[in-house]
Image: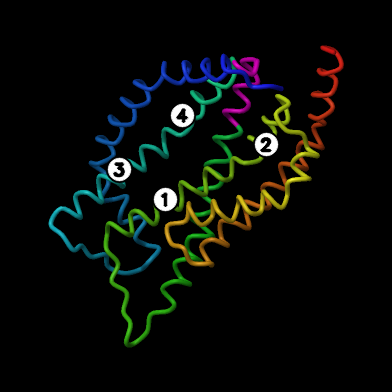
């Protein structure tokens, strides 16, 4: 399927219709969650089992604002995904039912990814990194860096867990076939390594591996799902019907 200029403009126009709504919802929920940011910080702080410190007067306030913002973004992710799939639906001819299932599946995978990160990946990564401390090396973690590390790591995991659904979408609309995904494994591995380096808050190999390995497994799962649902055959049949 060829993506023409009109399809791109239609996609952008659909997004513009919802920018104000998304912005207002994000700001309003951030303000509301700021009142509970202290409880949220205490909940997340259990991962390090120690005290947090600040090195400037405004750092605690700004850290709590960031925490409230990321929490609002986390809760509103289904709304953002709904807007995204609605914008993609018109240029690519997705029905209302298809947009619903794409929104539901990406939202479900997003929250599965964040829970997986919070319960399994994050504790292991923090324990490994703090394991280098000793009698002569004591960790002093600032609240600002802790907030950035936890929030970005959890949200990034949630986003990359949506990979299989976007692969199914690309195959469903004819952008790239299952064989295309299989032929480009080497480029996928390179892209995954770059994404892991960019999305993880720290550039160490452990955190990159904690994100890169699950992401590659999700890539393979996407290929398997495309084969199971026979999406390539749907694309071929459409091509024959229009040819």
The disc, 1 or 4, on the residue closer to the chain's N-terminal end is 4
What sort of colour scheme is used for the picture? Answer: rainbow
Q: Looking at the image, do the residues carrying marks 3 and 2 touch, with CB atoms under 8 Å apart?
A: no
The disc, 2 or 1, on the residue closer to the chain's N-terminal end is 1
Q: Which residue position holds label 3? A: 68
Lateral position of residue 114 relative to residue 137, left or right:
right
Q: Is residue 122 magenta?
A: no
Disc 1 secondary structure class:
helix
The disc, 2 or 4, on the residue closer to the chain's N-terminal end is 4
Residue drawn at x 20%, y 62% is: 54
Q: Is residue 24 above or below residue 60?
A: above
| Viewport quadrant of the N terminus | top right
Residue drawn at x 32%, y 50% is: 40
Q: How many marks?
A: 4
Disc 4 secondary structure class:
helix
Residue drawn at x 33%, y 87% is: 135
The image shows residue 58 at horizontal and vertical percentages of 15, 53
Lateral position of residue 174 relative to residue 86, left or right:
right
Q: Looking at the image, do the residues carrying marks 2 and 4 touch, with CB atoms under 8 Å apart?
A: no
Q: Which residue position holds label 2? A: 167
- Mark 3 or mark 1: which is in front? 1
Lateral position of residue 226 relative to residue 200, left or right:
right
Disc 3 from disc 2: Cα separation = 32 Å
The image shows residue 60 at horizontal and vertical percentages of 20, 54
Quick one: 88 or 49, which is closer to the camera? 88
The image shows residue 163 at horizontal and vertical percentages of 62, 41
The disc, 3 or 2, on the residue closer to the chain's N-terminal end is 3
The image shows residue 105 at horizontal and vertical percentages of 61, 33
Q: Which residue position holds label 1? A: 152
The disc, 3 or 4, on the residue closer to the chain's N-terminal end is 3
């Amino acid at each position: 399927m060829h993506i023409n200029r009109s399809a791109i403009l239609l996609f952008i126009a659909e997004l513009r219709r919802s920018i104000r709504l998304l912005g207002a919802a994000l700001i309003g929920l951030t303000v509301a969650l700021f009142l509970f940011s202290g409880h949220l910080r205490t909940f997340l702080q259990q991962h390090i089992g120690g005290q947090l410190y600040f090195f400037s007067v405004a750092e605690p306030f700004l850290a709590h604002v960031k925490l409230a913002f990321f929490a609002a973004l986390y809760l509103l992710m289904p709304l953002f995904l709904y807007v995204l799939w609605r914008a993609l639906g018109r240029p690519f001819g997705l029905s209302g039912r298809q947009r619903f299932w794409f929104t539901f599946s990406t939202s479900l995978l997003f929250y599965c990814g964040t829970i997986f990160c919070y319960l399994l990946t994050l504790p292991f990564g923090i324990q490994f990194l703090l394991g280098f401390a000793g009698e002569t090396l004591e960790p002093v973690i600032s609240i600002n860096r802790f907030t950035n590390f936890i929030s970005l790591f959890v949200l990034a995991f949630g986003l990359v867990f949506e990979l299989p659904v976007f692969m199914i979408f690309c195959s469903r609309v004819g952008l790239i076939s299952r064989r295309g995904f299989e032929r480009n494994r080497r480029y996928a591995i390179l892209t995954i390594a770059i994404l892991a380096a960019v999305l993880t808050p720290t550039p160490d190999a452990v955190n990159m591996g904690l994100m890169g390995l699950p992401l590659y497994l999700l890539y393979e799962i996407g290929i398997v799902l495309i084969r199971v649902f026979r999406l390539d055959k749907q694309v071929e049949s459409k091509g024959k019907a229009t040819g």
